[in-house]
């Protein structure tokens, strides 16, 4: 009696929306710190990566929470979807082509591992099939 594919997609989209909101709020906070507190770019840059990691982890937790088993895999899947959104936004802003392969690979690794970590900590509570 698992969820239909449509239900899985809805949970994925809700997780991506929630993660996007978290990312936006954290980036806004970082920008505010840069403006008001004179935070340098060298300090803000790791904070931006941390914001992406936290958002991917929370989204992976949400998405995998609805899985009965292999939650870490569902979290990883969320991380891949989160990375795809990251690439899409970078392409829309014209920054994708200026990114190095190292930065792209790092963001992929961060997104997938953070999503997986979210999936791993999503255990417990009521379990529903996905």
Image (cartoon, rainbow, N blue to C red):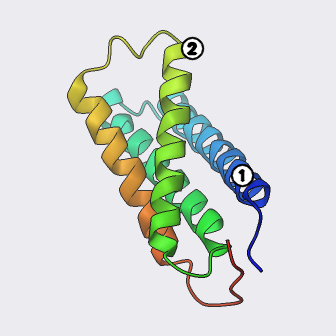
Give residue 126's position: percent from left, percent from top.
71, 89
Give residue 56's position: percent from left, percent from top.
51, 53
Image-quadrant location for residue 58: bottom right
Residue holding disc 2: 92
Identify the secondary structure beneath mark 2: helix
**The furthest residue to the bottom:** 125
Instruction: Measure the C-alpha gap from mark 1 to mark 2.
Output: 23 Å
Q: Decide which of tag 1 and tag 2 comes sooner along the chain.
A: 1
- Residue drawn at (52%, 38%) of the image: 30
Please say if 116 is above or below 38.
below
Identify the secondary structure beneath mark 1: helix
- Residue drawn at (72%, 81%) of the image: 128
Image-quadrant location for residue 85: top right
Nearest the eye: 116 or 58: 116
> Which label was assigned to residue 9?
1
> Which label was assigned to residue 100?
none
Please say if 28 is above or below 82.
above
Give residue 91's position: percent from left, percent from top.
50, 16
């Amino acid at each position: 009696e698992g969820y239909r594919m449509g239900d899985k997609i809805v949970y994925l989209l809700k997780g991506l929306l929630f993660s996007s909101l978290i990312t936006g709020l954290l980036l806004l906070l970082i920008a505010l710190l840069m403006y008001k507190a004179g935070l340098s770019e060298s300090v803000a840059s790791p904070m931006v990566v941390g914001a992406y990691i936290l958002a991917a982890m929370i989204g992976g937790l949400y998405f995998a929470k609805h899985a009965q088993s292999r939650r870490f895999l569902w979290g990883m899947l969320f991380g891949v979807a989160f990375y795809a959104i990251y690439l899409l936004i970078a392409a829309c802003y014209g920054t994708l082509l200026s990114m190095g392969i190292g930065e792209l690979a790092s963001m992929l690794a961060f997104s997938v591992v953070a999503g997986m970590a979210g999936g791993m900590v999503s255990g417990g509570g009521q379990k529903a099939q996905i």
